[in-house]
């Protein structure tokens, strides 16, 4: 029960990041800058606690052994995929989908189907965790509840194919992240995996930050006219040092990134990736209430009913 509660708490905290990110975007930061900054801060905070373990693991590697060298290279490739799927590609797909639409409910609804994709891919690839009728009924119930929460009394969806494709891409990225995590959980601690996710997530996101910061969206591919600007600072320090901005960034870095990625990797190991993923249905529920508290958004009766239906659906999925 402790690990179920921890998975629920992690998913609820992640749900609150939508409102926190909205505050930073209103302040002037881009989505790529927000993701990159929160991962950089989380990585730096985690690094002192990991240095000793890094040195011990480096000494333990026998690179004269070809098998050990090949395993190290292969695992590092998997860590790169973790940084891409759980970091840069996931955030880019989701945020650019939000950017292309006037109806963010479409994005939120599709992205929240990631537990279903996780269960299907897990069954197809690893042939584990048989999908029961109770799980199917619980998933349908949870998705129905999420739909009521996300639409929040305004039943309008976007039919832009790019918005739909990018949203589905974000959901699939997280599902693939969960499957890769299942492989690396057997050989590495949750702290090592979390640190690697931050490292490769930042490295794969930095080129996007450079392009956004130095050229602007309207001249994205005009490299020649802006080549001299590449050496300048990537981030607006005057903006970042504002109290409300750095406090929100600290929350996203310390709690939503460092704490939640670490606890998520632990609960996926203790429970299973399918069981833990079902708690992600609570993301829109927390997002709804945090949006009402921080952004003054309205909560309607259909959304309240959706919260109850979502809870029932997750209970059915994870009930033993």
Image (cartoon, rainbow, N blue to C red):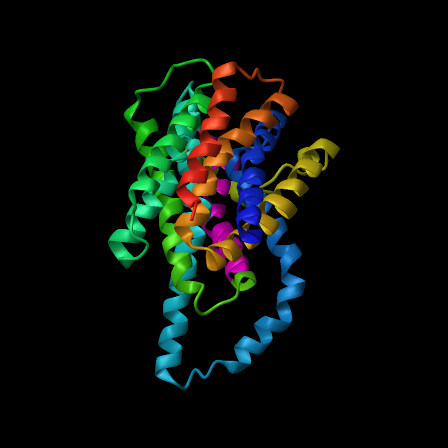
Q: Is 4 in front, or is 267?
A: 4
Q: Quadrant of residue 29?
A: top right
Q: Is 44 in front, or is 259?
A: 259
Q: Is residue 49 left or right of residue 118?
A: right
The span shown in magenta is: 193-218
* Residue 285 counted in the magenta span: no
Against 36, is 242 above or below?
A: above
Residue 131 image point, x, y percent: 29, 47
Give the mark count: 0
Residue 108 image point, x, y percent: 43, 29
For the point 57% across and 46% down, the residue is 5
For the point 36% across and 33% down, the residue is 167
Residue extending farthest to the right is 243
What's the magenta bit mostly, secondary-structure-wise? Answer: helix
Residue 21 image point, x, y percent: 57, 32
Residue 150 image point, x, y percent: 45, 24
Residue extending farthest to the bottom is 64
Answer yes or no: is residue 227 visible. Answer: no
Q: Is residue 251 left or right of residue 229?
A: right
Q: Quadrant of residue 315?
A: top left
Answer yes or no: is residue 320 visible. Answer: yes
Q: Is 136 in front, or is 74?
A: 136
């Amino acid at each position: 029960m402790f690990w179920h509660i921890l998975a629920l708490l992690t998913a609820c905290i992640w749900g609150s990041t939508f409102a926190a990110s909205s505050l930073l975007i209103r302040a002037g930061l881009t989505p790529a800058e927000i993701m990159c900054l929160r991962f950089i801060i989380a990585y730096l905070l985690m690094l002192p606690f990991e240095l000793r373990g890094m040195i011990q693991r480096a000494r333990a590697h026998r690179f004269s052994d070809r098998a050990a060298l090949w395993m190290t290279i292969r695992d590092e490739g998997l860590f790169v995929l973790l940084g891409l799927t759980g970091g840069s590609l996931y955030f880019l797909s989701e945020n650019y989908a939000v950017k292309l639409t006037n109806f963010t409910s479409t994005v939120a609804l599709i992205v929240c189907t990631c537990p279903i994709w996780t269960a299907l891919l897990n069954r197809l690839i690893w042939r584990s965790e048989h999908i029961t009728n109770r799980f199917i009924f619980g998933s349908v119930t949870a998705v129905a509840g999420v739909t009521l929460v996300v639409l929040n009394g305004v039943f309008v969806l976007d039919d832009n194919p790019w918005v739909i494709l990018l949203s589905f891409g974000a959901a699939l990225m997280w599902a693939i992240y969960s499957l890769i995590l299942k492989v690396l959980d057997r050989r590495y601690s949750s702290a090592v995996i979390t640190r690697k996710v931050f490292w490769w997530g930042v490295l794969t996101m930095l080129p996007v930050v450079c392009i956004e910061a130095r050229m602007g969206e309207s001249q994205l591919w005009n490299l020649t006219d802006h080549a001299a600007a590449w050496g300048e600072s990537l981030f607006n320090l005057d903006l970042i040092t504002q109290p409300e901005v750095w406090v929100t960034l600290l929350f996203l870095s310390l709690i939503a990134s460092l704490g939640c990625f670490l606890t998520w990797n632990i609960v996926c190991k203790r429970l299973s990736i399918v069981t833990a993923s079902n708690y992600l249905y609570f993301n829109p529920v927390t997002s709804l209430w945090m949006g009402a508290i921080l952004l003054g958004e309205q909560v309607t009766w259909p959304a309240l009913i959706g919260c109850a239906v979502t809870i029932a659906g997750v209970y059915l999925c994870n009930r033993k």
